Amino acid sequence: MTDRRRINGPPSGTRPVVFASALKRPVPTTDRPTRQRQPTELRKIFLKTGLVPSASGSAYLELEPSASLFAARKTPTSLIPPSSALKLACTVHGPKPLPRSAAFSPNLVITTHVKYAPFAARKRKGHIRDASERDLGVHLETALRGVIIAERWPKSALDITITILEAEDDHWWGDALDSHDASWGMMNVLAGCITASSAAIADAKIDCLDLATGGVAALVEDDDDKYGTTIPKLVLDTDPAEHQSICAACVVAYLPNRDEITEIWLRGDTSKASLAADDKRTAYEALLDGAVDAARGAHTVLSEAVRESAVRIAGQAIGGNATQ
């Protein structure tokens, strides 16, 4: 089904055009962004709540861009940026009564809606949600169902809407189209959606068991050894554009205070992973533990944003009582 009421833009990329003369020579591999962080070091997170006054709760999340992006701005060698960053906004509406025509529900009915902006990715998105966006919505709803105390709002609904303003790339733009067969950027997008949704739900003053945060860990192949082979290694908070190949990735929705996982999504091949000699864990367990560690790191930012939201709401309540 196509949307005939709008004039859609071209289905090609939304980045600046590249002239044909620049494509006659091969893309140098030195332009690939490199990871300058430690394997266990996370990117800086900006998280702010209460940005949409018309919503019950709202949050805005932004990840720090890759260091190579700043270097490319100082000494540009191409019109195409080496990598992108994650920027998304979340709004929460509710709890609100269900329509009269809806069936009785003893618990809160949660609806999630994840949508990419048309300019969010290198390939332009349409106005109608595709399969990947619906898939992200299902994962997000599963993650939040284990957090919200739904039995406190019978016959009520909660709408969670996320707009992705800039999405993570699946691979470096200079690689061949068939060099990566998975959408690795969706893993980081889902982790950001979980963290931003938890902040927006807390801003909407909805009772929860804990603050859920998203974390990502991956097995990547970068450095060649003396035999010319690559050995996958575990890194946290991966930027897919910074690595030659990603073997497997895992994203979790984690409750730090309860030490529980409400959602897990793992994809890829973990059979070629190489761990330390004294490490008795399997590759699956190492990926899961790495994603949990990344979620714990994001929890510090989330708790500070929720504290600022509580201070702001308390100030508004005191100011409203003073004027009465």
Image: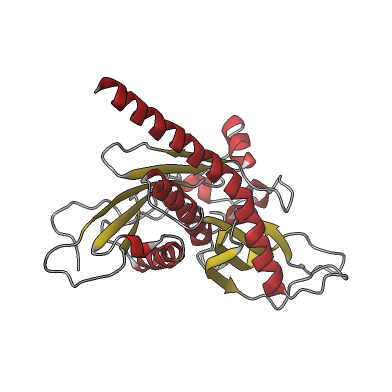
Q: In the image as oriented, which residue stretches furthest toward the top?
A: 323
Would residue 299 be found to the left or right of residue 228 on screen? left
The image's colour scheme reads secondary structure
Q: Position of residue 235 (x, y in %)?
A: 69, 58
Residue at image coords 26%, 56%? 127
Q: Can you tell which quarter of the image residue 294 is in?
A: bottom right
Vertical order, 42 against 170 (above or below):
above
Residue at image coords 35%, 66%? 134
Q: Nearer the viewer, residue 237 or 23?
A: 237
Q: In the image as oriented, which residue stretches furthest toward the bottom?
A: 271
Residue at image coords 67%, 75%? 270
Q: In what quadrant of the picture does the N terminus appear? A: bottom left
Q: In what quadrant of the picture does the C terminus appear? A: top left
Instruction: Tell me if I can see residue 128 in this picture.
Output: yes
Vertical order, 237 against 51 (above or below):
below
Would residue 218 be found to the left or right of residue 96 on screen? right
Q: Nearer the viewer, residue 48 or 167?
A: 48
Q: Position of residue 215 (x, y in %)?
A: 58, 57
Q: How many marks?
A: 0
Residue at image coords 87%, 65%? 226
Q: Position of residue 102 (x, y in %)?
A: 16, 69
Q: Nearer the viewer, residue 127 or 158?
A: 158
Instruction: Tell me if I can see residue 165 in this picture.
Output: no
Q: Position of residue 81 (x, y in %)?
A: 53, 43
Would residue 124 be found to the left or right of residue 42 on screen? left
